[in-house]
Every structure is written in C-alpha cells, then in structure tokens.
Amino acid sequence: MTRTIGVTEVVLRDAHQSLIAIRMAMEDMVGACEDIDQAGYWSVECWGGATYDACIRYLNEDPWERLRTFRKLMPNSRLQMLLRGQNLLGYRHYEDMVVDKFVEKSAENGMDVFRVFDALNDPRNMARAMAAVKKTGKHAQGTICYTISPLHTTEGYIKLAGQLLDMGAQSIALKDMAALLQPQPAYDIVKGIKDTYGDVQVNVHCHATTGVTLVSLMKAIEAGADVVDTSISSMSLGPGHNPTESLVAMLQGTEYTTNLDPERLVRIRDHFAAVRPKYKAFESATLVDTDIFSSQIPGGMLSNMESQLKQQGAGDRIKEVMEEVPLVKADAGHPPLVTPSSQIVGSQAVFNVLMGRYKVMTGEFADLMLGYYGECIGERNPEVVEIARQQAKKEPITVRPAELLKPEWGALVEATEKLEGNDGSDEDVLTYAMFPSVAPGFFKTRDEGPKNVGKTPEQMTAEKDAATGASKAVTGPITYKVSLGGRDHSVTVERA
Amino acid sequence: MTRTIGVTEVVLRDAHQSLIAIRMAMEDMVGACEDIDQAGYWSVECWGGATYDACIRYLNEDPWERLRTFRKLMPNSRLQMLLRGQNLLGYRHYEDMVVDKFVEKSAENGMDVFRVFDALNDPRNMARAMAAVKKTGKHAQGTICYTISPLHTTEGYIKLAGQLLDMGAQSIALKDMAALLQPQPAYDIVKGIKDTYGDVQVNVHCHATTGVTLVSLMKAIEAGADVVDTSISSMSLGPGHNPTESLVAMLQGTEYTTNLDPERLVRIRDHFAAVRPKYKAFESATLVDTDIFSSQIPGGMLSNMESQLKQQGAGDRIKEVMEEVPLVKADAGHPPLVTPSSQIVGSQAVFNVLMGRYKVMTGEFADLMLGYYGECIGERNPEVVEIARQQAKKEPITVRPAELLKPEWGALVEATEKLEGNDGSDEDVLTYAMFPSVAPGFFKTRDEGPKNVGKTPEQMTAEKDAATGASKAVTGPITYKVSLGGRDHSVTVERA
C-alpha cells in the first residue's frame, strides 16, 4: 500500500530566484536538462515573472527562446510556470484579451502546467487566466497563497479551494512563499480540502526560510497531498526550498515513496554544485530565519522598508514601522504579504511613521484601499477608504478590476511595432506589454546574444586582483636601470 | 492535552564542534549564558571530548575552569556532557578507578547529566561510567548510537535500550551522529522503547547534515520522545543540528509545545550570529549532503580516507576504497562508523586497496578484530580474526576490555606531578591521562591565559592586507629622491 508522491523540481525557476537573485543563465541550465527530464519528476517549474524579467533585464536572453529550449531539452516532462493571474508576469492588471494571448502563446511554446495565483487570493483575478489555460487543453492549477492573520482560517482556505475548483482548477496549489506554513495547518488544510472535495490533486509549495517546512511537507503528505515542490540539494535551503534528496530520504521506509531516480539526482546535484559558485556575488546570506512567526513580516519586505527608511535618514525608526505594518495590513483587509501587496503595505507603513498616519498615501495604497487590486479576505477600514478616495480622487470599485479595462491588444501591437529590434511576433508584444520600460532596450540588444553574469573562479580572481592591484604589487626590492646624464646606473628600490 | 517537549541546547558543545571545528573560546560564550540559563531548556550540553581537547590544544583554556564557569553562569540549568564510556574523553580504555575519578570530579565541578555512549554500542563499555554517575547522584543517560547495517534492526535497538535500563540508565538517548536517522525508524525505535519499557525518558539527538532529521524529531515526538537536541539557529544546520527556533515553530498548533522563551531565543541567536563570523576560517562548507544514505560513509570519514589516499599518491582510487569499506565493516561485525571505529575501518580499507586485502593490518584494526574495543552487533569474520592474531601477536579476548587493565591512577598521578605547571589537582591528572601528548604543553603555558583563535573583521582585513601587500601596493607613479655621486635627483618610477 505504497502511495507515490509526485515532485515538482523548482531549481530552474524559484530556486535560483530565491538564492541567487534570478541570475542563472540558460547556458548554465542546459547541461542538467536531460537528467531532470529523466529523473521522474511530476513537473519541472522553469518559467515565471521574475525569470522572464531577469532574462530581458540582465541576461539579454529571450524568455520565449528559453521556454522553447526547455521544451526541446525536456520532451518527457511537464513544464510548469507561475502565473500572476490577471497580472500575467507584470505588475498591473491586463485586459482579458492580453491574458488570453499570453496563455495561448505560452502553451504554444511548450508550457504544460499553469500555476495561477493572485496576491490577494481574489478568485476573480484568477478566473480569466484559468479559463484561458483550459481553452488550450493544458493543466490549470488554482493557487491558495498561504498567510497568517486574525482572519485567515483553515476553513477559509478550504472554501477558497472550492471556489478555484468551481472555476475549473484541475489541481489546487497551497503556496507558502514566506515559509510560514507550519506542520499542523499544512495537515489541516490539505486534509480539509481532501475531505471536502474528494480526490482533488493537491500540490504543496513551501520555502525553507524558517527551517521547519520539510516537516510541513511530511504532514501535508500524511494528509493526502499528491505533489510537493523541492529543489535539488545543491540549490536548496535558506530562502530557497527543501532539498529534493532530503524529501526522498524522508519518505524511505514510510508508506509513501517518490519514484525519483537517485542516480539522476546525484548528477543534477553535481551540475548545480559546479554552477552555483559562479553566482556567489548574488547569493542570499540568509540561512534560517524564524522571525517572521512573530513579526509576520517577510524578510524581503523588512529589508525593503529598512532601505526606504535609511534613504530618509530615519534608519532608527524601523521598530515603529514594524509595529505600524499590522495596523496598515488590517486597514487594508489583511492581504497576504507577497508581491505586490508587501511593497504597497510596507511603503505605506513607512509613510505613516514618517509623516503621520495616512497624511500622505501612495497611489498604490490608495488603489488597494479602493478595490483596484481586487478584494481581500477582510473588510477595508471605511475611514481609510474615504481618505484614499479624497487623496486619489477616484471612486471605490467592487467589480472585478479588469472589467474596467478597455481592449488594449491593438495598441500594444502598434507600440511594439515601433520598437527597434522587435521581431513582429506576438511574443514580443507580450514582452513589451509586461515590461514596457525594459523591453525596448532588450529588443535593441537581442542580436548580441545572451550574457552570462556568472563568473568563473578565474574571472573572479582576475577582477579582484585588478581592483586591489594585488597581482602586480611590489613586494620585494626591484632593480631598475636608470639612465642619467648619459650614464647607466643600477638603482634598487625597496620599501622603507 | 498539550505535552511539553524538553529541549537540550547544544550550541555550547556539539554545534561549534560540528560547524567551526570546536574552536569557540569561552569568552565568546559567556555573554549568552544568562539567556541560555533562563530560556527554559531541559539541559544545556556544554562539555565533551572534543571541546576538552580543543581547550588545551588550541585555546590554552583549562577545560575544568570552563566547566566551573558554566556552572556559575547557569545556576538554574542542567549542564550536560557527552562521555565516551570507558574511553572517558580520550581514545583508549581507562582502568575503572580512573573512570570513577573522572565522573566524580566532573560532578563535583558542576556536571548534571552524563550522556554515556560507546562507539560499538557495547553495554559493557558503558557500565562502569554509568555506575559511577549514579554513585554521584547525577543523571546517567544510556546511549544508543544509531547506524544502518544489514544487522541493525529496530528490535535490536529496543533490546539495547533494555540493557542500558538494566544498568541503571535514567534515560535513553538515541544518538544520530551521521544524520542517518530517517523519520520512520525514528518513530519505530522511540515507540518500541516506550511500548516495551513503559514511561522511560527518551532523548533524541540528530545532526542536520542530510536535511531530513527535523522530520525525524517530529516523528520521534509523535512516538513519545521526551527531549530533543537542537541548536540556536545562528549556529545550526549543515553538519550541525536543527535550529531550536524551527523546532518551536514546528510544534506550534500541535498537541506538543516546548515552553521555551522566544525572547531569550532571539537574544541567544543574536549573540552567536555576532560571534560566528570570527571563526569563518574554521567553517565547514557542507550545507546538505544525502550521499550517506547510499554510501553509508559519514562525510568526515570520507574526507579522511581521501587525504590518506592523496598522501600515498593514490587519490584516484577513492571509489575502490568506498567499495571496500562495507566489506571491512562486515568483517568487523558491523560497528557503527563513529570515532574511533570510523577511522579504524577507513584506514584499513585504504590499506586493503593499496596493498591487498589484509596484507597489512593497522594495530587498531587488529585490536578491533581481536575484541580489544569490545563487542559489535555481528560476529567477526574468523579468517580475518586469525590474520589479526598472527600479525598483532595477540590473542582474541571476550571479556570486557577494561578487565585486563591494571590499576593506573597512581602512575598517572606520579607522571603528572613531574610535569611543569601542573597544579597538583586530580583534574590535572585526568587531563594528562586523557591527553598525554597535549597536556604537558598546556600545563606549561596555562598561566598565559586563554587564547581566542577567532578573528574580528578588522583583524582579518589587516592579516589579508599583510599577506597580499594590498594596502601597501604601488598603484601609481612614485617619486623618489635618489642621491647619486653627491647630487640629489628626482626619479619617478612607474609600472611599464
């Protein structure tokens, strides 16, 4: 009676996003693809907003070409991506036809599994993307962003899973981006979903930051979870994910198994163990951090707020800001703190401390209060909504935000066609649509081919030497021939 | 119905032994002692063989003074040590009276809990030390060294626990020095001990190397474990231990709790987060390593064998040696691979590969085969026993090895009294007894006081600059005044 647990390998997307600032170049991944393809994973996560952004911003790589290469190199695997619902891979809502187009093109270029989420857990922001995925015949996965608040309950998450299933989700992902998911709620939520909705596939995605979430995966599996996300050990832990090999070892001897090929795992591990040092400059320093359980503030959000405060010469007021965050969060109806809500709430908390509560409101926070990002689990504080209305001179909305958008595909095509280096494809239009400030530069330089920002040890030594002058440093006496008045003298110079 | 799980904090002993080569100086620990004392731990592990050794070998610190200082600074805590049974803290068997003396003195200087183990799991090697502990009225903890072999079974471990209880153990420690203890056996062994022997206290000690053992602690707790070992997060993971704070988070919301004071934990964490960088030069590079599940060879043993091979110019034969290890281990009756059996088996495997199987036998391996280290779980290969008998010109024994030792305390006192700088105490005799090659040097220099081998960032920068000449490097043209034939010339020198 052994049950096989599926594994989603995240090394090609979330692992390097979390550990080395999304900088891994395609050429450092291709060598592992055959082994990944053959290892027996349920799916291979390899694409998403940040990797797309990094491709065009830092690596001069066409993200669509990356996707097609993955498709070619991993013909036997389900390729998986993370999709921000109506935001696609960008930072605003897109009109429905752009959403359709993006999903269609992604499927056409090789994507199989679309993990669709919304930062506020508003199902209306996921609906169109899910419908689009279903139209392509690919796998639509509905996502619960896990957070902790006085309003978030196991029952609430179970209800949300039901809403996603009603929308046609073929599986439910429980997504724990802040490593907040403790073993007991992991068990309760998965068990609740299984008990309520029958044999629906449940995937669990946890980060490792707090050091506790491999236990959460164990409890989720005991509760019936079908697929869990891990990353090969040489690209794991810290703000990344639990090691794939540790998951395998965890299940040995139990009534669960993974069916992963251990020899392939060793090869994948060795590949990335060799690659990772090249990206040392981008490494996160965090090893384990459990502060979030008391502060409820994700590490990345905290450092953002700290740097905002420092820019204002108020670095010493971080404690006040940390106390302000829960209040702002409550006023906004308890959004999960994940991009972009974490930045929006964090910036407003900083403003409140520096200038008085809601004396100045950011445009984004006003939008959040007025419903332009969608609905949160809780009611928004009506007094703060009123301030937002006055400051932003906009009315609150209750409809699905994307309803208010006018068709924009035509305009996006037109704008893209004017850009030097655009290749006339829909894919380029989508790149421009999602990253309008970065795409023009990328189109111009695309012909130069991918840049690898990783550095070999030799390159690092050479650069360091150049910076310090070390390799050329004078360390002993040097004798010069000095010609003076037509006569040659031997002059020896040494340090005093 | 919440059950409180006790926690043993290992940061003062095993954590820095595993992570920074045992180098932490007492002065870098004292600042955390009050918080550790007040945090609510079941016990504080703070003393053992390697820390004792490091005190006199590297730090010019009297290990007994360290113990007394801990006692003074942590008046409310159970202080705990790791004791190698009849080996005490040394590498050979000591005659019973020396064992008695050591335990008596340790208790007198403040030790409360003695975790007594034997590398071969031979209860006879633990009996005298356990009896000595009981005579002092302190807590005698009997230890099971966990390993994996064709002969090691859950039933065998449960039986061993019974033997330890028969010897008067007040609790049983399940000690997993190689991070081999997977969740299912952790559950089965603890459950078996509880089911068989009733309400005996079970402590579980795991390293984190394989990334899976926090789950094992969870399953052990579910099976009834009473106390588990962890280390504060800033000195955790890798070859060290699971983070204390992650354990706390793991149990929140379950039917278990730790009762640890979260604010104290933050302070302890911050203390060691500040201290750790000083010991960067001694840091282990391992983050997670699951190879041991297939190789069954602990990481430290592997690197030892590699360096032995390299010294013989045979670095390319490591694979053969790795294949030889299980055979040698089987011939020896499947000893757990932990100090000293890991070194003994490893060296013999190297010899076998380089010179032919058992053509040359190390003295230690011959002793192991002839019973001088005690009994293993399995029968020893009689053919190899015979080779050992011939090469070592010694007869096999079946009695408890220490039975054959003559009283030695008098001679040890006499030898110690001749050493310059000895203070005439029994403690000094014990130091000499356990570390005869290191103690004389330490007694001589003890008056100079403790040395801290950690380095502040300023010290590190200064040393690096001195080594590379960086701060003094000539980077631009320099003008010298050169006196030549009584006339001063200005000579400018710059790089070609």
Image (cartoon, coloured by chain):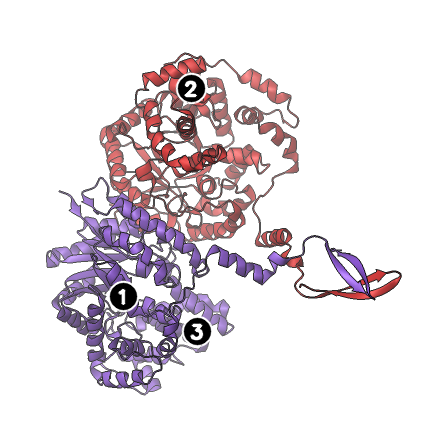
Chain colours: A purple, B red
User: Residue A300 occupies which quadrant of the picture?
Assistant: bottom left
Query: Do badges 1 and 3 share one subunit?
Result: yes
Q: Say which element carries label 2.
A: helix
Q: Can residue B119 be seen in this view?
A: yes
Q: From this viewpoint, which residue is outermost toward the left?
A: A198
Residue where numbered disc 1 is placed:
A67
- Tell me, yes or no, whether the two marked residues, 2 and 1, touch with CB atoms within 8 Å: no
- Rendered view: A121 above or below B207: below
Q: What label does residue B367 carry, if any?
A: 2
Residue A351 x/y as whole percent: 42, 76
What is the chain identity of the residue bearing mark 1?
A
User: Residue A23 occupies which quadrant of the picture?
Assistant: bottom left
At x 19%, y 55%, the residue is A190
Name the quarter where the N terminus of chain B is drawn. Answer: top left
Name the quarter where the C terminus of chain B is drawn. Answer: bottom right
Give, as a three-letter code, the residue at label 2.
Asp
Residue B125 x/y as whole percent: 39, 22
Residue where numbered disc 3 is placed:
A353
